[in-house]
Image (cartoon, grey):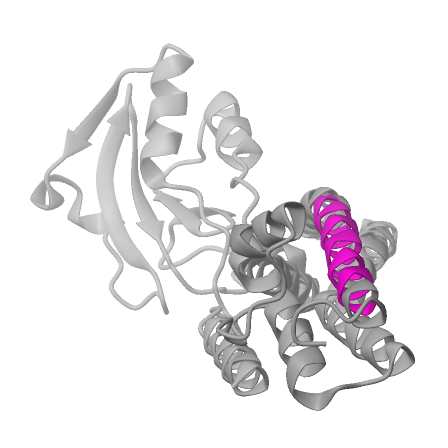
Amino acid sequence: MHSSNSKVFVFFGLFCFVFVTSCIPENQVSRIVPEHFLEALEHKGYTVTSLPKESADELVVSDIPAYELAGLFEVGEFKFSLYDTIKKVDFKNEEISGLHTLSNINLLLLSETVPPRDLNDLFLSLKSPLTIHDAGVFIYPLGACLFFSVFVLTERLLSLRRSKTFPRKVEKALKTGDFPHKKWKQNSASERIVWVALNENPSPESLKAYTDLEISSMEKGLFILEIVISGAPLIGLLGTVTGLVQVFSSIPDLAQGKDVLAEGIGLALLTTILGLAIAIPTLIGHAYLGRVVDKRVTSLQWVSSRINDARSRKIGSF
């Protein structure tokens, strides 16, 4: 029964992991909210006026793939239209229907005249906040580390409860000498040890071996936490190195206006942060579980010793 529940728990956890990872969008782009650009203009002292579509119809272009019009605006004498996209588009800064263009990640700015230098620099300086998508393919192994860490920690915390290992009734019976009880069921590790001693009449060595088996089952899965503690930072480091290589290899592309520098730095920083953010709590949880296991081991060894003492002295049923 105990083994069956563990298998169901494992299969359910793996199903949840596969389902969650399959839901991660692969073509999601880190975005700049159009309102952030308008707020940045106002913060610089510009007055931004929203225009109706009819007043600047020449700035509205309907055949731009993947882009949608976010609005028409006027800053002083300068009028422009702002487009937004939720897809990753390799847009080249070239004229569209005689209009000047500026693109930055997901935003596209169209104007009839050359944008003022300050506005141009402000638009190109906007950066999107880091998201999990900036971690690239490394989000999958890091996600696996996070999943297995949470899964094992949760499963062990539930399995190492006193009621599942060393109930208070057993501890009380040991202290009072009213031990063992034939009416005890097999709901905990200590009760199963007592049941084996009462019903199978094992030798002291055999009973100790069975106790060691129960102790071993309490340590199940802890090695996975050790792998996560070591592996998550290493995956983050691999992402850092990959991001730095991407930065240095893309330096010739910077003159063409490609934003590969920001992508490489984002990859380098985010993977390191995620790796450490997963490893540190896992390390704390592993240390705590190790302490719990040590306490439970001592308790089960106490149960085994008391049973052997009772048998040697022919107390109770022995």
Relative to 73, residue 233 above or below: below
Residue 271 visible? The answer is no
Relative to 277, residue 44 above or below: above
Please tell me which residue is depicted at 41% across the width and 49% down the height of the picture: 108
* Residue placed most toward the observer, 171 or 218: 171
Predominant SS of the magenta segment: helix
Image coords of residue 139 (percent x, y): 64, 62
Q: Is residue 124 left or right of residue 317?
A: left
Image coords of residue 5 (percent x, y): 51, 81
Please tell me which residue is depicted at 22% across the width and 49% down the height of the picture: 58
Q: Looking at the rendering, which quadrant does residue 80 occupy?
A: top left
Q: Give the farthest residue toward the top.
A: 45
* Residue placed most toward the observer, 76 or 142: 142
Image coords of residue 290 (percent x, y): 77, 51
Relative to 206, residue 132 above or below: above
Does residue 293 show up magenta in the picture? yes
Q: Is residue 296 left or right of residue 37?
A: right
Image coords of residue 116 (percent x, y): 46, 25
For the C terminus, the quadrant is: bottom right
* Residue placed most toward the observer, 155 or 167: 167
Please tell me which residue is depicted at 38% across the width and 50% down the height of the picture: 99
Please tell me which residue is depicted at 22% across the width and 43% down the height of the picture: 71
Q: Is residue 278 left or right of residue 17?
A: right
Q: Is residue 275 left or right of residue 144?
A: right
Does residue 84 show up magenta in the picture? no
- Magenta residues? 288-308
